[in-house]
Image: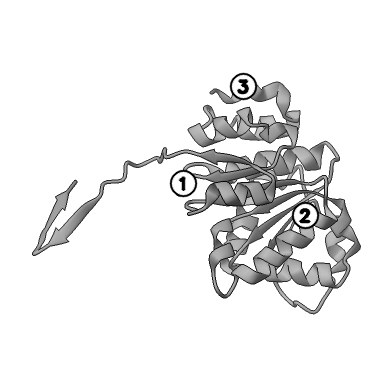
Amino acid sequence: MELNSIKNSMPKELYEILEKEVTNLRPAQEKAVKKGLLDGKNLLVCTPTASGKTLIAELASLKSIIEGRGKAVYIVPLKALASEKCRDFRRRYGNIAKIALSIGDTDSADPYLAEYDLIVVTAEKLDSLIRHHSPWISGVGTVVVDEVHLLNDPERGPTLEILLTILKQLLKNAQIIALSATIGNAEELAEWLQADLIVDGWRPVKLHKGIYYDGEIEFY
């Protein structure tokens, strides 16, 4: 699917940025569009690393922001990853959206975030912001959950599960985009998120599997 085939389904400002870097949508991106990505549908995307999951989240987030349907929060598990994503988003979208990073003090409501459109946070930080009754939370239109398979992590999983449960109650009309390279119970998780499941095995570099023994690798 060529990017220009969905030109009329996204804001002009967004298309003009993406057309400089993207010509054709990758398989998972095409599937997401056909499943209602640009129509506000909840999606759980399970595809390999570097298969284009982030762009799926960006399309949903920036469309919501530009069209005035609400802010976007991008939830990641690690502070370092949050900083990396924030830099990337500012580089690409800094001229059309105000982008903030919120990963610090978990005992603050950070009222300044009300002035921003796309907010990159860790799960722990967003959980804290909700508990501090940050008023801007109600204005969120898109929730992106990166590495959602960490729901199964014994340390981070409980916080993420409670956070998503609260968000589903607080933001009944928000679009949820959950991303992961691998999930064992994808169908069950999609049902819990009330999301359509996108599964695809395409990757930019072919993966070869083999066994290393006695100085040699036997591929199979």
Q: Which mark is residue 206?
A: none
Q: CA distance from mark 2 to mark 1?
A: 28 Å
Taking the image as shown, residue 43 lies to the left or right of residue 165, namely: left
Q: Nearer the viewer, residue 139 or 35?
A: 35
Q: Where residue 66 appears, x then y in whole percent?
A: 80, 38
- Asked whether the residues under the numbered discs 3 and 2 touch, taking CB atoms below 8 Å apart as contact, a structural biologist would say no
Q: Which mark is residue 168?
A: 2
- State the residue at coordinates (60%, 68%): 157
Q: Where residue 118 appears, x then y in whole percent?
A: 75, 52
Q: Which mark is residue 4?
A: 3
- State the residue at coordinates (56%, 31%): 31
Of the numbered discs 2 and 1, the one sitting upstream in the chain is: 1
Q: Nearer the viewer, residue 53 or 3?
A: 53
At label 1, counting other C-alpha atoms closer than 10 Å, the crowd grade (few under 14, some 14-19, many 20 or more) is few
Q: Which mark is residue 50?
A: 1
Residue 143 versus residue 11 in the image, above or below: below
Amino acid residing under circle 3: Asn
Of the numbered discs 1 and 3, the one sitting upstream in the chain is: 3
Residue 87 versus residue 50 in the image, above or below: below
